[in-house]
Amino acid sequence: MTARPLRGKRQHAAGTPWWSSKRRLASNMNLAILLIALVIAAAVALQAKKARRRGDDAVKPRAPLTNREQAMYHRLRSTLPEHIILAQVSLGALLTAQSHAARNRFNQKIADFVVCTPAFDVIAVIELDDSSHKTRRDRDAARDAMLARAGIRTIRYPHTPDADTLRRDITPRPPQPAPSRQPERPTERRAGTERTAAT
C-alpha cells in the first residue's frame, strides 16, 4: 500500500512548507507597498517643483535701490544740488563702440550712480562698494580703466562719505593762478656801457 503525502497546513502541495509561502507573500506585499510609496513621493516632489517654478516665474516688485544705496543717493542730492544724480545706470548709456564684441564688455554692467552737469555731461561715476568687491579688485580696475579711456573717471567709496569728502572729490577745483613774476626793467645800452633805466 502506497503512502499518500500529507495535505493541509503542515505540507504545501509542491512540497514547500506553508509558512514559507506566506513569508514570500508578505515580502512581495511589502515590496509593492514600498514601490507605491516611492511613486507617490516622486509625484508629490514633481508637483512641488512645478509649483516652485510657477512661483519663480511670477513677477514681483522690488525697491530699485538698497538701503545703503538710498542713503548714498540722498547724500549726493543734498551735497550737490546743482548737479544731476542718476542711479543704476547701464554703462551702455554712457559708452559706445563700433564692434559688437566691444559693446559686450560693458552693455550688461551697471554704474551705481552717475553725477552729471545740468546739461547731462558726465562728471564722474560713483561706485558704493561692499565687502564682495574685495575679491573683484582686478575686474573693478579693468572696468575703471575702460571708463577712463572714454574720459569718465570712477570714484569708489566703501561707505557713504560725508559731504565735505564728496565736494572735494567731485566738484572741480578752480585753476590756480600762475605765480606772478616781477617785470624785468629795461636796460639802456650806450657806447661801451650798460645801465638799468630808471623807472
Image (cartoon, rainbow, N blue to C red):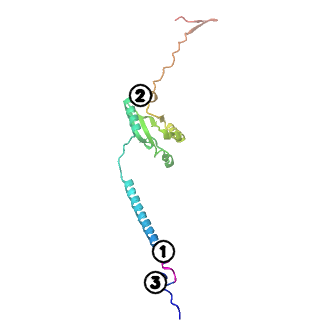
Cα gap from disc 2 to disc 1, whole angstroms: 84 Å
Name the disc covering residue 8, or none: 3
User: Which residue position holds label 1?
Assistant: 23
The three-letter code of the residue at mark 1 reads Arg
Image spot of residue 89 (x, y percent): 41, 41
Q: Earlier in the sequence, mark 2 or mark 3?
A: 3
Cα gap from disc 3 to disc 1, whole angstroms: 17 Å
- Decide: few, some or many residues near mark 2? Use Cα within 10 Å; few <14, some 14-19, many ≥20: some
The three-letter code of the residue at mark 2 reads Ala
Of the pair 39 and 121, the residue shown nearer to us = 39
Cα gap from disc 2 to disc 3, whole angstroms: 101 Å
Tell me if residue 58 comes above or below residue 113 in the rendering.
below
Image spot of residue 36 (x, y percent): 42, 68
Residue 5 forms part of the magenta stretch: no
Of the pair 23 and 102, the residue shown nearer to us = 23
**Which stretch did the figure color magenta?**
15-20
Does dot 2 land on a helix, a strand or a loop?
helix
Name the disc covering residue 163, or none: 2
Tell me if residue 98 comes above or below residue 18 in the rendering.
above
